[in-house]
Image (tube, rainbow, N blue to C red):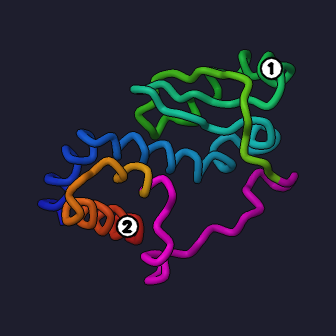
Amino acid sequence: MEKIQSILNPLYDEIGLTKFLLLEEVKAKWDFLVGSPLNMHTYPFELRDSELIINVDSAIWLQQLKFMQSMILSKLGDYPIKSIRLRIGKIKKRRKGNGHSQTPIKQHSKDFFKDEPEWLKIAISFVRDPEIKDQIRRAVITSQCK
């Protein structure tokens, strides 16, 4: 498997898939990373180089979060994110709870191959060669299932 990764990683970087995968992982773990109530008012929107752009739902929370930027950044310490930028924008709606998303996490299984994630469709949409597109799709989905 190491040989495949050594081939795929530069390809992922070249087509921007590494950034997509990183952002999707942060989005998936956002509730756990920042906890409640921050997860109710924030959502990772975009990753530019090593800066995470976080949408905030109101000016009041934006002001409060400016004082908490270093704390949020420290919670992202396992990721290659060097800075964050806060801005007012739309966030993914959640119900109040224990700091975790109320939507059940889909279990990885053979059915996972039937429901290709939207971000993957977008990421490989510009690849013209259908064979290469299929190989990237299979490699990404297979790596997500492990």
Q: How far apart, in angstroms, are the residues tagged by discs 2 and 1?
A: 38 Å
Query: In the rendered image, which quarter is residue 57 located in?
Result: top right
Q: Which residue is at 50% across, 72% downward?
A: 115
| Type of amino acid at the residue the image marks with label 1 | Gln
Which residue position is annotated with label 1?
A: 64
Is residue 15 rendered to the left or right of residue 112? left
Magenta stretch holds residue 74:
no
* Residues rendered magenta in the picture: 95-120
Circle 1 crowding by C-alpha within 10 Å: few under 14, some 14–19, many from 20: few
Please tell me whether mark 2 sits on a helix, a strand or a loop: helix
Which quadrant of the rendered structure holds the C terminus?
bottom left
Q: Classify 86 as above or below 114.
A: above
* Residue 18 image position (x, y, % from top left): 34, 44
Q: Nearer the viewer, residue 143 or 128?
A: 128
Is residue 122 rendered to the left or right of residue 65? left
Which residue position is annotated with label 2?
A: 141
Which quadrant of the rendered structure holds the N terminus?
bottom left
* Residue 123 image position (x, y, % from top left): 39, 49
Query: In the rendered image, which quarter is residue 145 located in?
Result: bottom left
Dominant secondary-structure state across the stretch colored magenta: loop
Is residue 125 rendered to the left or right of residue 131? right
